[in-house]
């Protein structure tokens, strides 16, 4: 094979790859629209589901050490605040662990509130539910 033929084949390969990417994007878009429509139909057909529960992002936005210091003044102030928020930590957690604990606690509270609002029950009034993460 000559150099020109090899270059032509490489160019054709690049074009084919580009077309495959465009096709994949189109397929993804169609699938996403279909999934959204199915979710909408499920919500409409489920009589006891008043509102769909919010989707959580892949991970909560992590609080930073500077934010914690600004809010609580010191490491010990942050530990006290964690305890007041129902966060129990073993030993002496690092700033990163404290930040993650506050971030996850906030995300879990939002999820729990949405769930309780969607499925209210007078039987849980005054209840404290702890989530242990090992």
Image (spheres, rainbow, N blue to C red):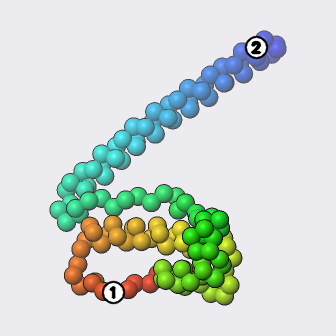
Say which of marks 1 and 2 sits in front. Answer: 1
**Which residue in the rendered view is the most extreme toward the left?**
47
Q: Image quadrant of residue 65?
A: bottom right
SS of the residue under disc 2: helix
Rendered position, 23 above or below 106: above
Residue 58: image location, x then y, percent: 52, 58
**Residue linked to disc 1:** 127
Task: Tell me the crowding category of disc 2: few under 14, some 14 to 19, or many 20 or more residues within 10 angstroms, Cα based.
Answer: few
- Helix, strand or loop at mark 1: loop
x, y (%) of residue 131? Answer: 47, 81
For the C terminus, the quadrant is bottom right
- Label placed on residue 38: none
* Residue at the image position 62 percent from the left and 74 percent from the top: 73
Q: Is residue 79 above or below residue 66?
A: below
Query: What is the crowding at mark 1: few (fewer than 14 residues within 10 Å), some, or many (at least 20)?
Result: few
Taking depth in this image into account, of 52 and 93 the one nearest to the observer is 93
Residue plotted at (53% across, 84% down): 83
Residue 32 horizontal/vertical position (percent): 40, 43
- Left or right, 34 with reference to 92: left
Q: Quadrant of residue 56?
A: bottom left
The residue at the point 41 percent across, 58 percent down is 55
N-terminal of the two: label 1 or label 2?
Answer: 2
Q: CA distance from mark 1 to mark 2?
A: 75 Å
In the rendered view, tell whether residue 25 sits above or below residue 110: above
Q: Is residue 46 visible?
A: yes
Q: What x and y, as percent, mark residue 22?
A: 52, 29
Q: Do callouts 1 and 2 mark residues in contact (Cβ within 8 Å)?
A: no
* Residue 133 visible in image: no
Residue at x 37%, y 72% (from the top left corner): 112
Identify the image quadrant of the N terminus: top right
Q: Tell me the residue that label 2 is attached to.
A: 5
Count of numbered circles on the image: 2
């Amino acid at each position: 094979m000559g150099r020109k033929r090899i270059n032509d084949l490489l160019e054709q390969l690049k074009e084919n790859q580009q077309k495959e990417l465009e096709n994949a994007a189109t397929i993804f878009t169609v699938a996403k629209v279909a999934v959204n429509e199915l979710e909408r139909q499920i919500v409409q057909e489920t009589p006891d589901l008043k509102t769909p529960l919010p989707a959580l992002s892949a991970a909560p936005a992590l609080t930073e050490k500077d934010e914690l210091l600004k809010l609580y003044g010191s490491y010990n102030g942050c530990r006290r605040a964690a305890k007041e928020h129902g966060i129990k930590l073993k030993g002496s957690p690092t700033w990163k662990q404290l930040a993650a604990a506050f971030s996850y606690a906030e995300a879990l509270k939002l999820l729990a509130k949405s769930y309780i609002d969607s499925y209210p029950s007078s039987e849980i009034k005054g209840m404290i539910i702890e989530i242990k993460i090992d």
